[in-house]
Image: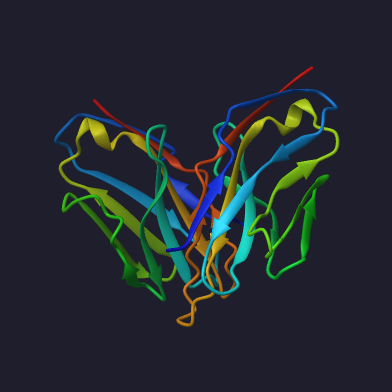
Amino acid sequence: DAGVIQSPRHEVTEMGQEVTLRCKPISGHDYLFWYRQTMMRGLELLIYFNNNVPIDDSGMPEDRFSAKMPNASFSTLKIQPSEPRDSAVYFCASSSRTPTQYFGPGTRLTVL
Amino acid sequence: GDSVTQMEGPVTLSEEAFLTINCTYTATGYPSLFWYVQYPGEGLQLLLKATKADDKGSNKGFEATYRKETTSFHLEKGSVQVSDSAVYFCALSPLDQTGANNLFFGTGTRLTVIP
């Protein structure tokens, strides 16, 4: 049974470039979460969706960040333009009608 | 608001030592409580959970009991192994009438077990 799939696993880009992170949730799960993890700030919830609809995006740091979920099996997190302070590990997680969330392996983003 | 406070790390133990990582919570109502574990280079994995007062969650030799009277959910293991070295996160899911499944995470406690 496939878990949450994220791509790419590692991304290195230069300041000012657009970055797109991708996530495929577990089939049948109707909640999808995007988190960011850094040493300084720990694990932060950026945004979450229910049935493809964004429910709470109050954790999105600024307008440079955007997230979409065009269908039940795919979501993207986009940063445009990227900045060095965006360097972090970005996790996607999904859940069904229970509070237990299942995390993907993460995307390690480095912005030079 | 809802929040979780867990023991600051890092924690270093010798193999076969007893482990306790403290976690207390603040919430209205009756939240569900979780421990997640993150091994190096990986995402978070559910370790155990408890959904009501006095429930004990257990997995892989780890245990935690949901104590409503002390608002705590401390993680324990009687004999740690080198393979238990990881970061442990306590988390809370509030009782939410909308059905939202948001989780509030603690800051994480890094455990290192030395042979």
Q: Nearer the viewer, residue B23 or A89?
A: B23
Q: Residue furthest top?
A: B115
The image quarter containing residue B33 is bottom right
Q: Where is residue B38? Give x, y as percent.
A: 59, 40
Q: Where is residue A52? Give x, y as percent.
A: 37, 73
Looking at the rendered image, the quarter that the C terminus of chain B falls into is: top right
Q: Where is residue A12? Give x, y as percent.
A: 31, 30
Instruction: Answer above or below: position of B4 versus B77.
Output: below
Residue A2 appears left or right of B64: left
Residue A72 appears left or right of A47: right
Q: Residue at x 25, y 33 (%)?
A: A85
Q: Residue at x 70, y 48 (%)?
A: B74
Q: Where is residue A34? Give x, y as percent.
A: 40, 55
The image quarter containing residue B29 is bottom right
Q: Residue at x 71, y 61 (%)?
A: B67
Q: Residue at x 41, y 76 (%)?
A: A51
Instruction: Answer above or below: position of B46 versus A111.
Output: below
